[in-house]
Image: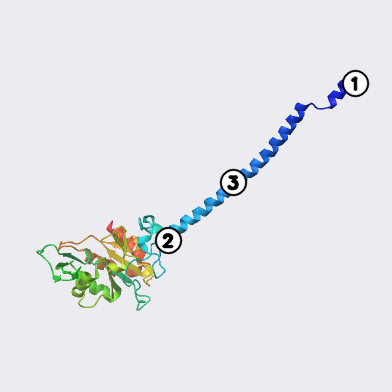
């Protein structure tokens, strides 16, 4: 009888163990809740600081509310290719980037580079052969440029002006290039002129963007000796070998032959593709 009574009454150590177990369970639950709150709060803090960092690193804006190109990261300007057109930087030049509407929507436009494409000039020495001299004022000083015209340049300008809208797009400075073109284009074959201030300067290189000039890229060709110049629209570009002083050069004559038969192509980019393939550039 006595043994049965003692079996029903729990001993003191047993009560203490149960109490300790109960307290541990309550502590475990509280710890879990606190840990969950801390983790959630930490994640929200990360999101907040991430947004703040993006806001603080956005490019500054000028008075015209346009992104200033010099404030953009090099990651945007490092490579300009047809593959990343959606990442174009804002235009940084001070010239007129938009040409007037074409006189005829059916007329095709030829953009010609100037230096080493149509002419070659020297200012550091007096060459043996040259056609004329221009003396622009550059940085407050008068500089003599001795200009040699590429063979067939006069014939090319006259030929193109009869069938195409002709635009000279040069990375040369306006003070210099305008005087050269005044001498080169005495018959006003060239419809428009675009200078360095109409280019983008990207990592020290000048890029000529044909987009946004109010011309259908299906009806546009650019002729340039510098691949960096047409990096945005390589499918519209005809490469040409640089000209220095070779009086037997016939690159412009072959260009006339190409443009003579380009009418059979509806898209000028197809014509360019065929020309580049035939010439094995």
Marks 2, 1: nearer the viewer: 1
* Gap between marks 2 and 3 measured at Cα: 41 Å
Mark 2 crowdedness (10 Å alpha carbons): few <14, some 14-19, many ≥20: few
Residue for point 40% across, 58% down = 84
- Residue at image point 46% right, 59% down: 55
| Residue placed under numbered mark 2 in the picture | 86
Give the quadrant of residue 111. Answer: bottom left
Label 3 and label 1: CA atoms lie apart by: 57 Å
* Residue that extends furthest to the right in the rendered view of this protein: 1
> Is residue 238 or residue 210 the one in the foreground?
210
Residue 176 is situated, as x and y percent measured from the top left of the image, at 21, 70
Residue designated by label 1 = 1
Earlier in the chain: of badge 3 and badge 1, it is 1
The disc, 2 or 1, on the residue closer to the chain's N-terminal end is 1
Which residue was labeled with disc 3? 38
Cα distance between the residues tagged 2 and 1: 94 Å
Q: Residue at x 37, y 60 (%)?
A: 71
Q: Position of residue 183 (x, y in %)?
A: 18, 74
Image location of residue 207, percent across then percent down: 31, 62
Q: Residues within 10 Å of mark 3 (few under 14, many from 20)?
A: few
């Amino acid at each position: 009888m006595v043994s049965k009574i003692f079996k029903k009454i729990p001993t003191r150590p047993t009560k203490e163990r149960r109490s300790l177990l109960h307290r541990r369970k309550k502590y475990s639950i509280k710890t879990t809740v606190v840990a969950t709150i801390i983790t959630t709060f930490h994640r929200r803090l990360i999101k907040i600081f991430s947004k703040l960092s993006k806001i603080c690193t956005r490019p500054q804006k000028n008075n015209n509310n346009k992104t200033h190109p010099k404030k953009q990261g090099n990651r945007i300007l490092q490579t300009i290719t047809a593959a990343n057109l959606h990442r174009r930087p804002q235009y940084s030049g001070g010239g007129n980037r938009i040409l007037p509407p074409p006189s005829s929507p059916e007329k095709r436009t030829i953009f010609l580079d100037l230096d080493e494409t149509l002419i070659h000039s020297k200012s550091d020495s007096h060459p043996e052969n040259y056609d004329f001299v221009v003396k622009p004022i550059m940085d407050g000083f008068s500089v003599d440029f001795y200009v040699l015209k590429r063979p067939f340049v006069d014939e090319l300008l006259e030929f193109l002006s009869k069938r195409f809208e002709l635009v000279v797009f040069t990375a040369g400075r306006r003070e210099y290039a305008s005087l050269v073109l005044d001498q080169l284009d005495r018959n006003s074959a060239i419809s428009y002129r675009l200078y360095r201030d109409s280019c983008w300067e990207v990592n020290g290189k000048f890029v000529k963007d044909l987009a946004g000039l109010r011309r259908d890229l299906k009806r546009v060709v650019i002729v340039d000796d510098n691949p960096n110049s047409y990096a945005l629209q390589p499918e519209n570009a005809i490469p040409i070998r640089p000209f220095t002083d070779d009086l037997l050069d016939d690159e412009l004559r072959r260009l006339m032959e190409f443009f003579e038969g380009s009418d059979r192509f509806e898209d000028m980019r197809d014509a360019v593709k065929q020309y580049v393939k035939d010439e094995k550039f």
